[in-house]
Image (cartoon, rainbow, N blue to C red):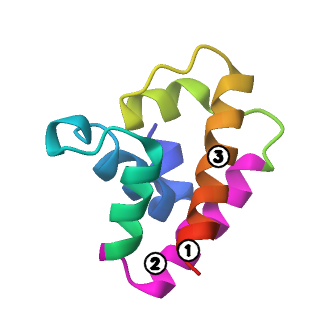
Amino acid sequence: MADLQTRFPALAGFLGAYFPDAALEGRRTDEEIVAFFVSVTLAEDLQATRAQLDEVLALPVLPTASLARLANRRLDSESAAREWLAKLRILLGERAK
């Protein structure tokens, strides 16, 4: 996980800060979490997060266990992790417009 946080700090910050306690804060869906993140994040930080998300999605093998721990999310397989990250990338693109 340290490698993920070192190589992709903006993405790690997004996943680690906004997903683990989202339900406790009243945001239960990925759409709600992303909308909140976009509403409180500077444009350059959004760009960095999107760029790092693209970099992670381009990896031949995802660090699935690290992603799951960081976001406190069950990701049963690499394909599930890739699908979830791709969804987040789409949502970040839609919300940032």
Dot 3: within a 10 Å radius of its alpha carbon, few (fewer than 14), some, or many (20 or more) residues? some
Q: Nearer the viewer, residue 31 or 68?
A: 31
Magenta span includes 52: yes
Q: Which comes before the other along the chain, label 1 or label 3?
A: 1
- Is 21 left or right of 43, judged from the image as shown? left
Q: Is the residue under label 2 in contact with that under label 1 (CB below 8 Å)?
A: yes
Locate residue 35, reporting x and y percent: 41, 62
Q: Which three-letter amino acid code belongs to the residue tagged 3?
A: Lys
Residue 87, disc: 3
Determine the image quadrant of residue 72.
Answer: top left
The image shows residue 51, relative to residue 26, as above or below, that is below
Residue, far top: 76
Q: Helix, strand or loop at disc 2?
A: helix
Question: Marks 2 and 3: in contact by CB < 8 Å?
Answer: no
Check residue 45 in the rendering and tell me which mark sits there, or answer none: 2
- Residue shown at the point (72%, 58%) measured from the top left: 55
Assign the magenta stretch its main secondary structure.
Answer: helix
Q: Amino acid at mark 1?
A: Ala
**Magenta segment: does it hold 71?**
no
Q: Residue at x 56, y 74 (%)?
A: 48
Kind of element beneath mark 1: helix
Kindly identify which numbered label has been placed on residue 48: 1
Above-or-below relation of 69 to 59: above
Quarter residue 19 falls in: top left
In this picture, which residue range is highlighted in magenta? Answer: 40-57
Q: Is residue 83 above or below residue 79?
A: below
Label 3, label 2: how many angstroms apart (C-alpha)?
Answer: 19 Å
Relative depth, front residue between 84 and 58: 84
At mark 3, the secondary structure is helix
**Viewer-nearest residue: 82 or 64:** 82
State which quarter of the image contains the C terminus: bottom right
Residue 29 at x, y percent in the picture: 40, 40
